[in-house]
Image (cartoon, helix red, strand yellow):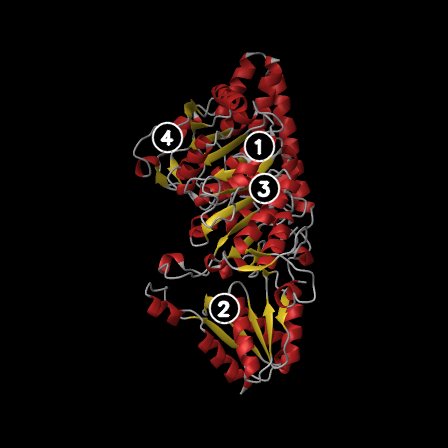
Amino acid sequence: MEQELLTDLYSKMQRIRRFEEEAARLYTEKKIGGFLHLYIGQEAVAVGALSVLKDEDYVMTAYRCHGHYIARGGSTRAGMSELLGKVTGCAKGRGGSMHFYDIERRFMGGWGIVGAQLPVAAGLAFAEKYKGTDNIAICFMGDGAINIGSFHEALALASLWKIPVIFVIENNYFAMGTPLEKTAATDDLSIRALAYPMARDTVDGHDVFAVRACIHAAAKRAREQHLPTLIEAKTYRYRGHSMADPAKYRSQQDVDQWKSRDPIKVLGEKMDALGMKAIREQIDQAIEDEVQDAVRFAEESPFPAPETALDYTYV
Amino acid sequence: MSNAMLNDTQNQPAVREIQIRDALQEAMTEEMVRDERVFLVGEEVGGYNGAYKCSRGMQEKFGSKRVIDAPIAENGFAAIGIGAAMAGLRPIVEFMTFNFSLCAIDQIINTAAKARLMSAGQISCPIVFRGAGGAAFQLGAQHANSFEHFYAYTPGLIVLAPATPYDMKGLLKSAIRDDNPVVFFESELTYGRRGPVPEGEYLVPIGKADIKREGTDVTLITWSKNLFLTLEIAEQLAQEGISAEVVDLLTLRPLDRETVLNSVAKTHRCVIVQEQHEVASYGAYLAHMINSAIFDELDAPIGLVSSLEAPMPYSKALEVVILPSKERVLEAVRAVCA
């Protein structure tokens, strides 16, 4: 059981990491267009959180969405194809990096307007309560989302209407290039929950087990009492805001300090110490093969046909 | 046919006349009885029975689970509706007026209208946003906007702007059953207006314009409450010996090009009457569409009567100057018929 769990968590984090490293390479080769926001460093948040939810629960996030998509079980072939704008992508080349979807897994995107996904995710959870299920929704955002109106309207309404939703702030300490101390008057971000009010929690987002415990408690609160929770997960992105950002606004020392606690490294070392080194190496190899296969598949896949440009505008 | 409902009740059995607010209430009530997934959310829709009494008695009938009073948070409750639609419900979101919809327009344009394309059809968003649009008496600049074109500009949305009680009811029912996001414009000035609405079930189709008065000399195209002004003008023109055909668009997106073009090809002259400002407006698009499709059929440049280019001033002496008036429309018609 323990082994199975470690294997699962490690595989998912490593799959996200290697998927995105390859995506970065393809971006520099100009095979991927537009923006590419990498999740590298933050993997423990999505993987830990989604590992304790049910298949029927809804997942929604912002534009830094590859990690949540893969953590939810989304196909790396379809993800890589989406980045290359291919018809085999998880949105048939209509979404791109910021707009991954996998509705079969109730992964609802991938949204590009900061904070706008919060009340929409609350609406998903509202619908489940309306239908009388015990399904919930989880909604991820960056620390840059906490000052916009839709954040506050979503929290106010979720509390007022007892909506079973979990809001997770992934605090990576930068809203694009602006440090947290210039965007918020406190470094305790979940404190905002007190105003609406709703339950709150703060968790080390580099600790996949701490994230699991925290989300498990919030999910229980949502499922059993229809109560929302606001969570701050403290984490870090090792890369710039997007591939266009060399991240010169922060010190290498800070980056190195977070990297020394890298969740994948830490979990890998734990597995090795438990005598699971051979298993871990097998996983690494399998993921390497999977990611290379995804790249090959994406590169060989066709682009959408020009005559389909207007498809999916209306039902 | 709505044409018959408007003009020709003499040869039919007596049809009851009801107010537009009650036609809307009937549409919502019938659809909520028919489909458990339909619910209504908005400011004052429950205990207050709607700011304009369009949801009278509905909370009593359906309970506060399905007729939901929202706090003043248009972005928030519109987006909760959008999320609920994505999860399989069929929300009706009431904006007290479309002036306040600007607080939610990001969600309508960036989320509801685009979800289907961005997800390649995985997500649908069957939702109706409805409420009053346009000027009423002396509401001042912030409460008198005509915003149809903001929404009609956006692929992915269906935009409806009916005028008569009959069309209001039948089109709202079609909107609630449609699988796309729909923006549905009403008018504060006409909620109390009465007109024939038959008992029982009927639908008015989305995407079909309606010829409300037939004529041969000039086509007058309009939508929303300016239909009533335009019909009055057509009557006056008839006395002057000009036979005007009145096309009520009903649906702004997707536009019924066929009905519009057939009418203008028949009369060879056209005047568009709109409450929007002219610059970058729906009427300007319409004129372009007609020009590019059937330029050879036109005997005169297309007339476009719009609100003048200023935010709406409060005084009644000024409001009438800004809005399209009977005199300005008549002048435009005489110019194209000269």
Dot 3: within a 10 Å radius of its alpha carbon, few (fewer than 14), some, or many (20 or more) residues? many
According to the image, label 1 marks what residue?
A: A130
The residues bearing labels 3 and 1 have C-alpha atoms spaced at a distance of 12 Å
According to the image, label 4 marks what residue?
A: A189
According to the image, label 3 marks what residue?
A: B85
Q: Are marks 1 and 4 on the same chain?
A: yes
Q: Which label number is shown at residue B274?
A: 2
Element carrying mark 2? strand
Amino acid type for the residue under numbered disc 1: Tyr
The residues bearing labels 1 and 4 have C-alpha atoms spaced at a distance of 30 Å
The residues bearing labels 2 and 3 have C-alpha atoms spaced at a distance of 32 Å
Vertical comparison of B316 with B42: above or below: below
Mark 3 touching mark 1, by CB under 8 A? no
Dot 2: within a 10 Å radius of its alpha carbon, few (fewer than 14), some, or many (20 or more) residues? many
Q: Earlier in the sequence, mark 2 or mark 3?
A: 3
Mark 1 touching mark 2, by CB under 8 A? no
Q: Chain of mark 1?
A: A
The residues bearing labels 4 and 2 have C-alpha atoms spaced at a distance of 49 Å
In front of the other: B92 or A240: B92
- The quarter of the picture where the N terminus of chain B appears is bottom right
